[in-house]
Image (cartoon, rainbow, N blue to C red):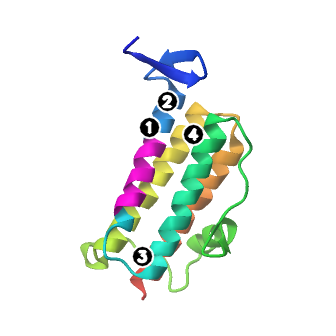
Amino acid sequence: MADTTSLYGAQRVKKTHPRILFRGQLDLLQSEVTLLCTKQIASSVYRELCDIQKILCAIMRAEVLEEPLGEYAICNRSLELLHALSHDPPGGHHFPTPEIGQVCAQLNVLRAKVRHLEILSIEALPERTDIHDTLNMLSGAVYTIMLEEQNR
């Protein structure tokens, strides 16, 4: 019993089940966003991180309860808009270097972990294109936020 956990209700699966691994990484990502919110950061980044946290919580809820995932925004900007900006950012693309500073570096780690979570979602939840698409847009949104913070 120690090597199994509840997937839904009384249904038990191995702790290495793809959905459990996805949930674990989603939980870890939520924890990292919370930790980043505790740092001394600009209020705009704080608000953006709070919105990201809401999106991650909604993904967890939608996956666990097998509900559809709605559309979300970060600071009143749709994920679609932020994702589009990530493909053609004002000022061009920037690759992270140590000079970007701690907050931007942590945002970049967050972006990479969202991308990893997207890949896990495709493996664990092949039918949940709403979750895949949201995570894809979210990684672009975090990249856009990182670039904006770099330019502040």
Find the magenta span and give its range. 25-35
Are the residues flagged by discs 1 and 2 in contact, CB closer than 8 Å?
Answer: yes
The residue wearing badge 4 is: 121
Type of amino acid at the residue the image marks with label 4: Ser
Type of amino acid at the residue the image marks with label 3: His
Nearer-N-terminus badge (3/4): 3
The dot on residue 91 is: none
Measured from the top left, where is residue 56 in percent x and y? 55, 52
Type of amino acid at the residue the image marks with label 1: Gly
3D distance between C-alphas at marks 1 and 4: 12 Å
Name the secondary structure under disc 3: loop
Farthest front residue in view: 9
The residue wearing badge 3 is: 94
The rendered magenta stretch, by its main secondary structure, is classed as helix
Q: Is 146 rendered above or below residue 118? A: below
In magenta segment, residue 23: no
At a point 62% along the width and 67% down the height, the residue shown is 83
Are the residues flagged by discs 3 and 1 in contact, CB closer than 8 Å?
Answer: no
At a point 40% along the width and 59% down the height, the residue shown is 34
Are the residues flagged by discs 4 and 2 in contact, CB closer than 8 Å?
Answer: no
Q: Is 80 rendered above or below residue 63? A: below
3D distance between C-alphas at marks 3 and 4: 27 Å
The dot on residue 20 is: 2
Nearer-N-terminus badge (3/1): 1
3D distance between C-alphas at marks 1 and 2: 6 Å
In-image side of 130 versus 123 (left or right): right
At a point 26% along the width and 78% down the height, the residue shown is 99
Measured from the top left, where is residue 138 in percent x and y? 57, 60
User: Can residue 139 be seen here?
Assistant: no
